Image: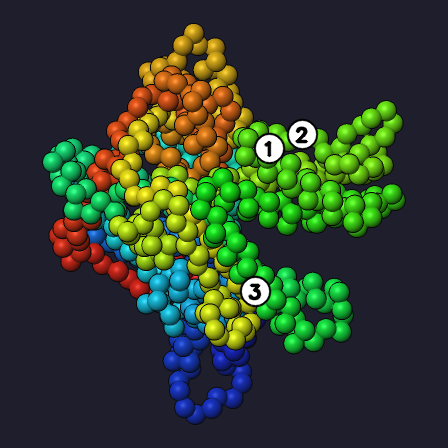
Amino acid sequence: MGKSNRIKQKKQNEKAMSLNDYSKPKKKGMPNWAINLISIVVTVAILLSVAVIALSSSGLVMRVRTAMASDNYKISGNMMKYYFQTTYQNFATNYESYMSYLSLDTSKSLKDQTIGDTSANANAIDTAIVGAEYEGKTWYDYFMDQTQSEVRNMLYYCEEADKRNISLDDSDKQIIDSSIESIRMTAETAGYTTNAYLSLTFGKGISEKDVRSAMEISSLSSKAMTAIAEELDGKITSERIETKYNENKKLFDVIDYTYYTFRINYSDIESEVKNANADATADDILNAYKTAIQDAKQKARELGSKTDPNEFEKYYLDYVAKDEFEGELETASKSVTEGKPEDAQIETIKNAMAEALVKEIMEDKKETDKAAVKTDDKYTVYGVEVTEAWAEIFDTVKGAIFDTLLSGQSTYIKDGAAFVENDEFSTWAFDDSRNAGETDTIYTGDGSEEGKEITANDKFFYASVYLLRKTQYVNNVKARNVSYMLFSSAEEARAAIDTLNAEASVNKDIFNRIAGELSSPSYSDYEDYLKGDLGVASFDTWLYDDATVLGSYTKTPISLSDGSYGVFLYVSEGDEAWRVNVKTTLLEEDFAAFTAEMETTYSPSIKVNDKVCAKAAN
């Protein structure tokens, strides 16, 4: 019982005792029996309120109250809490890199924060992420809408599961058990009981029972979805695929291009100017900002004049190498200042190093050569004599820049790129009049409009230059069929790989048997996988490497975005990419149509208790 409630109860008891003291003179008015009765009622009410608080903390009240329901399924207040917090936490994880730009403050109540409120942050991009229809509404409105929409869909599919006699089997329940066990282990590692950990993660009163119930609803819904998707998929004919493709080839064809973006940020310019002159004025900073933008435009024009792919790549690689040099040199030489070469010598080294790096990248080298050369007891770096310590520094700098350039190849060189709706470059590139070798330059931010005075309203300027290497073509690259097993730790995944290594040969049956024996929480097949589907570059590199043949499996665990670790087997070739994409589009359309039918059928039976939902979000 809280201190305030104990004080209230004590005062009420004292009052009741004084009223029952018949030795004192009685005042006219309400009879003693009535006064005594009221005292008893008040005291009981206080005791009940204390009990309600205790029950609320234990989760019992929200467990027995219904937040949403269909004819045959109920979502309790605690289950709604779990779903709401999952929606919220997934958003925070997915948009982690944007959180500083949003008006969303995770330390404050969602009900007190307005979407699109740029007073908190001038760079708020709320509506670009959540949709313009939520501008002026609260973050609670957004997350509750998303949660209720998701729960509605789950209830639709659970009702459909009943209709189709679909239910959770032992395998489904085992997956849920494994998920619960993972939570228990995480809680134990953190020093909590399972329920205490769940309460901290999803809200007061959430227990293992609530999470299991929520997972069962999600699992049944997912199982019904999968069955329906497989049914719809089987009905898509080759004729439908070809007809859909011919209706709008642009949506399924691809292009090859290379690009680079010159970026100028006002904050960087401001720091540079103030570091050089602590008394710099706002005008000084703005003038430096304008100069930097004009310089970026000039570089963009120079790059845009390179219509040969090799010359285009050489130009931006050289720019990146030189741009990275100063920062990498400063980092590598922090602890060594003695014997530093003169500025002119460093400039000579920078230019020569950039030339050497570009040559190595263009020759597809996997690692860089040393920058320093030792002759007898002397060290030279591109003809400049340096000390042994500085020779090591320049070797470090070259290695770091090489890694940056190497990763840039996958960033700036795009093969088989699909059309993107409402994208300025994509609209230009997929135009029927385009030819290979054409370039397009797009400015955004301050100074993007030619002829207008440059201001610092946006606080950035980007100049993106694109070279179209191959115009719109049919993507005939073959998809690949893979089997996978997932684990919660890299150690478990390595153990699975060791088990596979012990086999004389590995096929799909052996792979799945081992996955089952090792109790992989999730193992199945992925048919018609296309590069990029998983969003994991290391997996794509392995799967599409020439050395990866049928029957190959990953020799190291693949780290996935959800924190799990995967082991994959290349089973067979799939269909051509264009057919896979067309069929996926048709399936999405058919599935959306089926969902709309279910909404019409089951929506009238869905009941929503907004008060319980609101409490679930507290």
Amino acid type of the residue tagged 3 in the rendering: Gln
Residue 511 in which image quadrant = top left
Label annotation for residue 431: none
Q: CA distance from mark 2 to mark 3?
A: 36 Å
Label 2 element class: loop
Amino acid type of the residue tagged 2 in the rendering: Asp
Going by the picture, which residue comes out furthest to the bottom? 28
Residue shown at 82% from the left, 48% from the top: 342
Closer to the camera in the image, 466 or 504: 466
Q: Is residue 93 visible?
A: no
- The residue that mark 1 highlights is 360
- The residue that mark 3 highlights is 294
- The residue that mark 2 highlights is 369
The chosen color scheme is rainbow
Residue 582, position as x, y percentages in the image: 22, 40
Asked whether disc 2 touches disc 1, contact meaning CB atoms under 8 Å apart, the reply is yes
Residue shown at 82% from the left, 26% from the top: 375
Label 3 element class: helix
Going by the picture, which residue comes out furthest to the top? 504
Residue 57, position as x, y percentages in the image: 47, 56
Q: CA distance from mark 3 to mark 1?
A: 31 Å
Residue shown at 34% from the left, 21% from the top: 571
Amino acid type of the residue tagged 1 in the rendering: Glu
| Local crowd size for mark 3, using a 10 Å CA cut-off: few (<14), some (14–19), many (≥20) | some
